[in-house]
Amino acid sequence: MPKRRETEATRRRRAQLAKYRQGPNGKWESNAKKAVAIRVKRQSLRIGPLLASCKAKKVALEARNFQAALRLVKDLRDCSDEACLQSLIGEISSLSVTAPLLRRTLIPKVLREVSARFPNVREQVTPIIAKWRAVYAQEEQRVADRQHQAPRRRPTSSSGSSSSSSSSSTPEVVRMPQTPGPSRRALKQRRITFFLR
């Protein structure tokens, strides 16, 4: 009798059934233990859509804040008297900002330039810019810490024979001493406070 041909769908179905009959640790378990594992897995399936919805809400909120910041920048540039600026202080102070929003809209720089023309409002503007500076510095520090904790790939070294042959054939490179320049932290701090001063 000829052997029945096994299709790819049949092989996948057989592998799925074999995995279902096993427990979460790859061993054959009782039906009670499998039922508990299936119940937990079914409940955890809701976490994915929940996280996706939270991320979508966060993106939508950041988009609304960005549009509000752009509108406030336009209103600040159109301010011609102190009363106009005073009417925008409340909305500016309640604006939720992030480091990308401050960097893209440059609202601290515009607010500082406009408030310089009206000394009576400068006392209310200074705490707002200080709060934005702290938010920007914290987010930049968080990004730097995340990049520092990320694993770095080490360059692959050549074999000993190739290195010995190359060292014997190529002349030795003499490096000139470099003068100490500004540290990376100083350059980063200068970039952070460029538009927040």
Image (cartoon, rainbow, N blue to C red):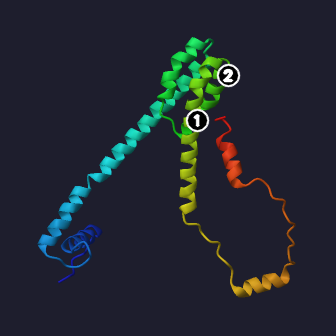
Q: What's under tag 2, amino acid-wise?
A: Ala
Q: SS at mark 1? A: helix
Residue on which disc 1 sits: 130
Residue 6 lies, with reference to residue 165, above or below; the image says above
The answer to whether residue 39 is left or right of residue 169 is left
- In the rendered image, residue 108, in percent from the top left (x then y), is placed at 61, 31
Q: For marks 1 and 2, give the CA distance.
A: 16 Å
Of residues 61 and 107, which is closer to you in this image? 107
Of residues 85 and 36, which is closer to you in this image? 85
For image coordinates 69% across by 80% down, the residue present is: 158
Tell which circle, 1 or 2, labels the residue nearer the N-terminal end. 2
Q: Quick one: quadrant of the C terminus?
A: top right
For image coordinates 27% across by 69% down, the residue present is: 12
Near mark 1 (Cα within 10 A), the count class, few <14, some 14-19 or many ≥20, is some
Q: Residue furthest left?
A: 32
Asked if disc 1 and disc 2 are in contact, CB closer than 8 Å, the reply is no
Of residues 28 and 74, which is closer to you in this image? 74
Q: Residue furthest bottom?
A: 161
For image coordinates 23% across by 79% down, the residue present is: 27
- In the rendered image, residue 92, in percent from the top left (x then y), is placed at 51, 26
Q: SS at mark 2? A: loop
- In the rendered image, residue 164, in percent from the top left (x then y), is placed at 77, 86
Near mark 2 (Cα within 10 A), the count class, few <14, some 14-19 or many ≥20, is few
Residue 133 lies, with reference to residue 161, above or below; the image says above
For image coordinates 20% across by 82% down, the residue present is: 2
- In the rendered image, residue 30, in percent from the top left (x then y), is placed at 13, 76
Q: Quick one: quadrant of the N terminus?
A: bottom left
Disc on res. 154:
none
The answer to whether residue 181 is left or right of residue 122 is right
Q: What's under tag 1, amino acid-wise?
A: Ala
Residue on which disc 2 sits: 116
Residue 52 lies, with reference to residue 12, above or below; the image says above
